[in-house]
Amino acid sequence: MASWFGGLGSGLGQSLGQVGGSLSSLTGQISSFTKDILLEGAEEVGDAATELHVSNSRLREIESINAALKLENERLKKVCSDLEEKHEAAELQIKQLSVEYRNQLKQKEVEISHLKARQNALQEQLQKVQTAAQSAQSGAAVLPPATTSASYAPVVRHSSGFEGDDMDFGDTIWLQQEINRLSNEVSTLESEVDHWKQIALSSKVKGTNEAEQSEMCKLQNIVKELKRNLSQEIDQHQHELSVLQDAHRQKLVEISRRHREELSEYEERIEELENQLQKDDVSVGAMDESKISQQKKNARSLEGEKVEELLAVKHLEDEIRKLNHKLSSIEEENKILLEQQELAKVEKIQITQEYENLKSDFSMLQSSVAEQDALLKEQEKKLQSKTSLPEDVVRLQEALLEAENEIARLSSLNQEGLENELTSAQHKNEKILSAYAEDQNSELSQLRKDLERKEHELNESITERETLIVELEELDKQNQEATQHMITLKEQLSKQHTETDSIIKQLKFDIDFERKKVSALEMEKMETIKELDSQKEKLSQCSYALNDLHISKQQLQDKIKDLQEQLRKAQDRNLQNKKEIGELQQRLQEREEELSRSLSKLTERSSQESEYTCQDLILKEREVEIAKLQHDISENKRLNEDLEKSLSNLRTENGKLIAAIEELKQELSDAISEKKKVYLEKDTVVEALKMDKRQLESELNRTEKRLLEQAQKYKQTIEELSNARSMDTTALQLEHERLVKLNQEKDFEVAELRRSIEQMEIDHQETKEMLTTSLGGQKQLTELIKEKEVFIEKFKNQALQVKQELEEYMKVSNKQDVLKQNLEEKDRSLAVMKEENNHLKEEIERLKDQQSRSTPVVEPKTLDIIIELESEVTQLKMIKNNLEEEIEVHKKTIEDQNQTTVQLQQSLQEQRKEIDESKFQCEQMNVTHERLSLEKDEEIKNLQKTIEQIKTQLHKERQIIQTDSSDLFQETKVQTLNGENGNEKHDLSKAEIERLVKGIKEREMEIKLLNEKNVSLSQQIDQLSKDEVGKLTRIIQEKDLEIQALNARVSSASCRQDVLCLQQQLQAYVMEREQVLAVLSEKTRENSQLKTEYHNIMDIVAAKEAALVRLQEENQKLSTRSENSSQDMSRETIQNLSRIIREKDIEIDALSQKCQTLLTVLQTSSTGTDNGSGGVNSNQFEELLQERDKLKQQVKKMEEWKQQVITTVQNMQHESAHLQEELHKLQAQFSVESDSNSKLQVDYNGLIQCYEQNEKKLKSFSEELAQVQHSIGQLHNTKDLLLSKLDLVTPSVATASTVSQLSGIQYSAPAVLSDESKLLQKELQQLKEKLQAKESTIRTLQENNQRLSDSVATASEIERKSQEETMSEMRQIKEKHDVLQKSLREKDILIKSKSDQLLSVSENLSNKENENELLKQAVTNLKERNLILEMDIKKLKEENEKIVAKSREKETEFRALQETNMQFSMMLKEREFESHSMKEKALAFEKLLKEKEQGKTGELNQLLNEVKSMQEKAVTFQQERDQVMVALKQKQMESSALQSEIQHLCEKEQRLNQELERLRNHLLEMEDSYTREAVAAEDREVKLRKKVLILEEKLASSSTAVENASHQASLQVESLQEQLNLVSKQRDETVLQLTISQDQVKQYALSLANLQMVLEQFQQEEKAMYSTELEKHQKQTAEWRKKAEHLEEKVVSLQESLEEANAALDAASRLTEQLDIKEEQIEELKKEGEIRREMLEDVQNKLMNLMNSTEGKVDKLLMKNLFVGHFHTPKNKRPEVLRLMGSILGIKKEELDQLLSEDQRGVTRWVTGWLGGGAGSKSVPSTPLRPTHQNIFNSSFSELFVKFLETESCPSLPPPKLSVHDMKPLEGVGTGKTSSTSSSSQMQDSAVSRASRRPDTNPFLAPRSAAVPLITPASSSGHLLMKPISDALPTFTPLPVSPDASAGAVLKDLLKQ
């Protein structure tokens, strides 16, 4: 069952793998579909015709796809329906199973309740460990990585609790390892949870910075990804756990069941063995469980045989006792039995020989099976070496070795068992009993040892369990330590994740490839299985031959039994006959007396005649003897002829069989070769497809990368395209007009373009240099390619050498095969000869027997035969010796070939090394090539910046082609090398050498193909490079020409317009280029989709092929079974018929004997009577002849029945022919399937051709694009020419206008002169002089004008002609343009209709694809179900097949029984008829006897009368008497022969009696020994029962321990599941906490916004308050000004003194070293202050009143200070800030202007004083403030406000508070001044770095670290925001006030000022 579970696991793995593969393909299709939808907008072509073409092709493709999808839908629906039916069938089975499992679940629930208590305890321990781990995490930094990977490796331990439990303990260990792994995962998840909790807490603490927000976004994305991964992992783990639980439950049930069965078996065995515990001292080494089981089976069979033999012995004893009494009647039957015994011996010899042949065949088969197993296992090892750990490999190797050992043991056991059976058959009952007793004793001792060993193993398992528990705890600790390390490793793993993803993709690809290989290997395995089946069929044929022999043996036994029954019947009949004979003897004696009397009378008369008759009698006797001898000789001859015929028949049959076997072999070899060819073709096709797939995948990856890079560029172009698409032709015309206007406007930008042209020239030169460098790089690449080609040539040479070597080895292997075939043929001939030998020996023995019996006349012939036989035997011996010599020669050749294979392996290993070295070199070359390609990529990127987009894209194409070629080289080389390595790993047997040859041929073909591809690629690369270089040079030349034209046209004004047009056209070209690329990408995607669909179809086809193969195999099996069954049936029927015929023959013989005895009796009776008795004898003879005729008729009937049976057999053969026809039909179906496959391949080729055609079309499109570009360039040139001509026209027009103006002046001038001549004559003279001078100048000008006009006229005429030409051209162009516009409109209409159609079709397609996806999902689900159901169905099929086979066997048995019943009924009827006839005859005989008895007296008279008549008819009666005498003499001869046989039998009787006495003595001794043994056995029974009870207790404890362990394991699994759930819950909680924290952050943001709103309200309130206060203060200031005017005179003197004091204070702040001097000055100032304080008392009182009035409003002032404290701006920007302040406070603009206009005496002084600046102000007193930041004045107001909000939002630690009491008291005015000065200096230094002030050294002022109000509010009835801030709320930093901020301090500050 363990193997079954393994199969189930592997099947589940495969199904999951398939499901995973289907899901991945689905996701791939979905992703490609979404990409197609995204890039649908990008499909736009510039030209209408091309767009139409594209749309038509697209429509066709969509229609074809639609049709294919419809077909797929129908197919999938069919599959769904089939799967649903299967599902329903499976559900019924599952229901039955679920009922059983529910019963088991009920039992398990009771156990679960016990285990839950332990789970709770484990959970508490886990919680403790978690708390410890958390504390360790908070404490420790980074722990070293714990070596937990060891727990992952599954270790197989063969410490089984009881028989067949090797896997169970391994399973428990594996479960514990699973537990460890799950606990590791739990701990890692817990660590992650803690990590995220910490992040959540930190996110609570941190503010809402932009960088932190971005981090939060990243973390959220990571959390989402982790969630997805976790959900996936949880699903996977749950699935795995469910599977494991099911498997574990099933295993537990199986284990318990097995355990119970084994216990019952043990009990039975112990009870059986208690009778045979005599010899316990025999010590035999520990044997494996498999050997023990086999020995037990042998013991059982031997016991059964012993019982049978004991019964037979008893029967024999009874029969011997009976035989002692009845030997006289069994002499003839004994002869038959002896002959049959000899035949049986001969048959035994034949059986032994056949058994030896079978053994040799079996060993051959075993070797072939072992080789195949080794092959399969090696291939599995290869697969597992790539996927699993090396420990798994070791485990598999161990399992292999064990399996091989078991096979060897089995074979040895089989041989030993068979040899023992043969020896036991040869020897008699004594030896069997002794051997059996010894075997049983040895088995008992072995069983005891096994029991002790199993007890020891149980103890070991318990100790191992305890150690495992300890290890589990240690591993838990290590896991907890490892979780901390995992957190650190997670960041590294995230980096490695990207790398591993690519590796995983490669591995997946490798796995797919290897899966395909595995499928191929499975196919090969199937082939091998078929070969095995054929060999099994041969074996079955041999077994049939054996069965025939066994049946013949059984027939003989049946005959013996029948004979025994007949003996019993005969004995009964003999008793009756004896009685009758006794009576008859009495009668005979009476008759003899009468005869003696009559003879005495006759003798007297016949004395005369006796002389003549004696001579006649002697002659007659001699003639009779001669006739008898001749008859014997003829019989011997007949026997010899029959034997010779049978020999010849056997030889012909053997020849036919050999021919049939050879034909079968040929057919097999043909089939295998055909299959191999098919597989080779398929492999080549598959590999080619794989190559294509890889290339396309690589191309796809590259294109996807390119698309990702160009996605941003394409987004813009897509938007522009969408805009352009929506525009109509009218809109395009409007845009054209607008662009013309824009061109006219942008003429002014030509100057800038000139500069850009100059830069372009410089860039052009740089690009030329770059191109030269890139050409150099290309040269390097070509050199690299050449080097790679050299490498390929080297590999080719190596491959050729390997091929030559392989060809040589192939020849050798062919020779070996030929020799093997010869050997096999000679073996067969040997077997045939042996059989013939045996037959000849039998014939010799028979002849010897006949010789001993026969007369010496026959001896020379038999001697001749014997001599011939002996000569034949010698010849056969000679042949045998020759064959043995040949075998030795062949062995030597085989050894030589083995040596050559070893050499081959070494050479292949060397080649492997060389290949590895070349691989390494290739990898290095690839690395260098990749580096070069990267460098070139960088260079090309630089070129992309400088050169335009078209050139860059061309470069990209070239790079793609280069990378493709390099990748192709790499892939092909890797594939070839992988293929060679894969092929070289096989063991080099003959079949493997053939495979290697084929593989190498395939590789050579691949290498040739790759070389061709390389050559074509290199040619393409050269062509591309040449074409690209040519294109680049052309482009450069064109650009040079364009630059020259631009340089020429720099002077013209239309250059700007041209440049703009060119830019627009360039953009249009770029757009078109991108559209073409988009179309290309779509085509590639469509290709990829088609390929994926094709691969899916291929997978489906492969599945169908596999199903077909399975069906064929099943059909073959069924056909073979049917043939076998038909053969069995025919054989059984033939055997039954032969048996019945033999029984009939025996009955006929018995009847004939009875008839003969009756005839003798009658003749004897008739001899005594008169002549009348002769008539009776003749009548009886006639009756006997009639009976013989009847018997002959019955024999004919039997023969007819035989013919009927033969006809039935022929009918059976016809049925088998029908079955074969059905097989042919199935093969035809398979051929149809293969045709469909070929069609699919053709379709795929067609698709590839379509793809190539599409590529060709794309190339043609690109060529057309190039032509279009060229035509556009030509149009540009024509346009430039036209524009230049137009520029020439404009200046000529200007000159003409000037000329006309001048002419007007000429004619107007004299008129003016004539008008003014009368008034101004003086002026006229002057003017005349001037006129003359001017006229001379005019004349010169006119001459110049005439010249210019002539030149202009000529120029105008030329221009008119050119204009007329251009106009005509323009008209033509306009006409063409109109035509094109019309065609464009028509095509637009067509395109719109087609686009509508496309949209509708695409919608249909999307719907169909959605339906398809749904169906595919349903299909995948159903496939998953189907796989599970198929597993169940396979099992059920196997069971069904077994049941069907059994039913067929039973049906055949039933038919045979029916036939036998029919036969028996026929036999009964015949027997009844015979009995009736015999009864009638007996009655007739009785009547005759009675008549004879009654008529004795009458008969005497009759006899006298008859004597008289006899004398008259003497002549006639003498003849009859002579005949009777002859018959009597024959009977006497027979009686003499019988007497001799009786003597033999008597001797045998004596011998048998002696044997009987010996056996009786032996039996008595045995009985005595048995009684002793019984007494001893009873004593041992008691001991053994005690031991059994102990062992049962131990077994129960062990089973409970095992069950407990398994329950604990399941509990641990469940607990770990619960822990996983807990951890997932914790993770969810942390995620919730994160969301809550994010919500809190949002709430904080909202609260910030609310606070800002409150602040604004507050500000408004403050504005209102301030407006009222300002009004009051204005009134007060108006009053105080009057008073101040009076006091100003006094204040002036005080100000002077204060200014001096300020100067002194400035000096003191600067010069800290001169503190003593300052103190003296301060004392002087104090004195002056004391003098003037009296003057200031009045002012102070007034100020105190003001303070009292303002003290209640301290909080608002503080808030205002808060608001104002942020505006530490530089002096330049202060008026702006003050204006903002004024606007916020509600001060009017006029007042603010007035205040600002004053010389810092109004607001500014007040503000600066208020802020703690330089000179104080008089107007408004304020508490002194300390600024917050040091270097803020360079920043703006808004920045300061933002920074303030940031500082307020982030909480910080409270500052070290310095209370007022801690400060030193200010002694008088002087101290106050010093402190205030120092504080003010500190403020000034911190606020603004004013003119070279040093930082103060006041130790009492704390640094600005946190925002804490230093002044408690005066009144508690303030605003809410003014109340003390709680710790929970976020704190804003108000500006700190100095520690001595009281009313006195304010006065002191004023004094300082």
Image: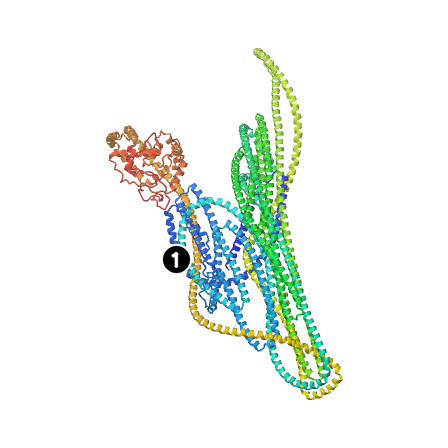
Q: Quadrant of residue 570?
A: bottom right
Residue 1224 position, x and y percent, is 65, 57
Secondary element at tag 1: helix
Q: How is the image coloured?
A: rainbow
Which amino acid is tagged 1? Ala
The foreground one among 663 and 232 is 663
Please name the residue that numbered disc 1 is placed on: 121
Quarter of the picture holding the C terminus: top left
Residue 1232 position, x and y percent, is 64, 53
The foreground one among 1509 and 801 is 1509
Q: Quadrant of residue 1789?
A: top left
The foreground one among 1538 and 1619 is 1538
Determine whether, in the image, residue 1198 is placed left or right of residue 355. Answer: right
Determine whether, in the image, residue 1459 is placed left or right of residue 98. Answer: right
Where is 800 relative to 1026, above or below?
Answer: below
Residue 722 seen: no
Where is 214 relative to 130, above or below?
Answer: above
* Marker count (numbered): 1
